[in-house]
Amino acid sequence: MLSKIISEKNIEILRQLLNGAENIAIVTHISPDGDAVGSSLGLAHFLKGLGKQATVIVPNRFPAFFNWLSGAQDIIIYEEQNEAAQKAISEAQLIFCLDFNSLDRINGVASLVKSSEAKKVLIDHHVNPKEFCDVIISHPEISSTSELVFRAICRLGYFPDITKECAEAIYVGMMTDTGNFSYNSQQPEIYQIISELLFKGIDKDAIYSRVYNTYSVNRMRLMGYCLSRKMKIFPEVRAAIMVLTLEEQERFDYQVGDAEGFVNLPLSIEGIDISVLVREDAKKIKLSFRSQGTFPVNKMAEMFRGGGHLNAAGGESYQSMRKTLWKLENLIKNRADFESTVASSEVDE
Ligand SMILES: [Mn+2]
């Protein structure tokens, strides 16, 4: 038996909301990752099994290596299918918001969700969810939203109804949000759940391969270039920063998701426990932060209009690359000061 993480009250409300809804929309965050896509499709499969109409809407395109997931072809991409997204959300009697904690994480979809009179349910694991849903199932201690979806389905009493397709989607989310169970993956129950998913018939080794062994030649070369030419090491503060300009991305025919995971690479160097990837985008500069141990990269991401988890976070900058890097390098070089400031502000709270 899994421990009951989600409150009984929330499960009861969820049950009632599901009883009263035929048409259900599921929305998730911009630049959907494995957990966003996995939790959404997992939930959609479950709802369809209950005989509901369930539509997944994402703000923009997700990486092609999730296309094999059952139901992926039916996902509505708001940026490209504006009207279909509008229709799906306006017709929904219930909206699930998965894997994000604030409406600004879903770009243009936010206004559709806001103006809908449907009941809204948040299922998420990011800290400090904003108040935009009627029901808030928020568990930052759980490493993926997909795991929360699995737990919710089980608590509703539908474990036997979980199909292989549903299990595959949930597994993808659990796997990708933990770097194939290499971080945020210490909870024993994660492995109990994986065991259940295996009994549902998923092929975890094949799933790994479909998600991770899909590099294009260009992506592989960009990675090599990044590591050999663009990785700056700050040994005294145990940190690494990699910078990718637009020009460099164009040189390697950059496709969406091509730099995915690069930020994790420097963490495999002995003695490095902070890594930042700074990637120039058409309109802004994106920053991805990773750490090992106790360094709170979410606090550092907050200095760049972002946030996230203790060991994985993201932010953005609208300043020049020079100014952005100056600010970032200063923060990194003074990591001890930064850590003690964060620690003391937490004591104040
Ligand atoms: Mn997630």
Image (spheres, rainbow, N blue to C red):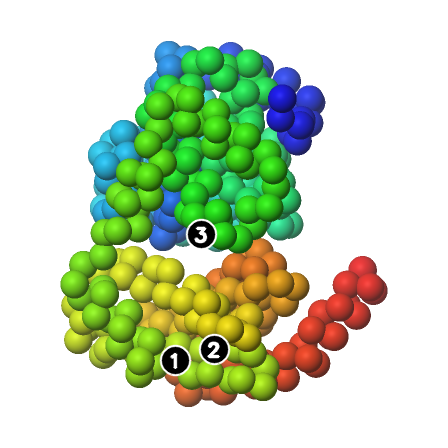
Would residue 72 appear left or right of 296 to someone viewing this image?
A: left
Q: Quadrant of the C terminus?
A: bottom right
Question: Measured from the top left, where is residue 280 in percent x and y?
Answer: 34, 74
Circles 2 and 3 in contact, beta carbons < 8 Å: no
Decide: is 164 above or below 283. Answer: above
| Numbered label attached to residue 179 | 3
Circles 3 and 1 in contact, beta carbons < 8 Å: no
For the residues labelled 2 and 3, the Cα–Cα distance comes to 19 Å
- Which SS class for mark 1? strand
Decide: is 8 above or below 223. Answer: above
Q: Residue at x 69, y 73 (%)?
A: 339
Front residue of this view, candidates 326 and 177: 177
Q: Residue at x 58, y 86 (%)?
A: 236
Q: Is residue 298 visible?
A: no
Circles 1 and 2 in contact, beta carbons < 8 Å: yes
Question: Measured from the top left, where is residue 6 in percent x and y?
Answer: 65, 29
Q: How many marks?
A: 3
List the residue tagged with mark 1: 231
Find residue 47 and report its image quarter. Answer: top left
For the residues labelled 3 and 1, the Cα–Cα distance comes to 21 Å
Q: Is the residue marked by circle 2 packed among few (<14), some (14-19), or many (20+) residues within 10 Å?
A: many
| N-terminal label among 2 and 3 | 3
Decide: is 335 above or below 213. Answer: below
List the residue tagged with mark 2: 240
| N-terminal label among 1 and 2 | 1
Q: Quadrant of the N terminus?
A: top right
Residue type indicated by callout 2:
Ala
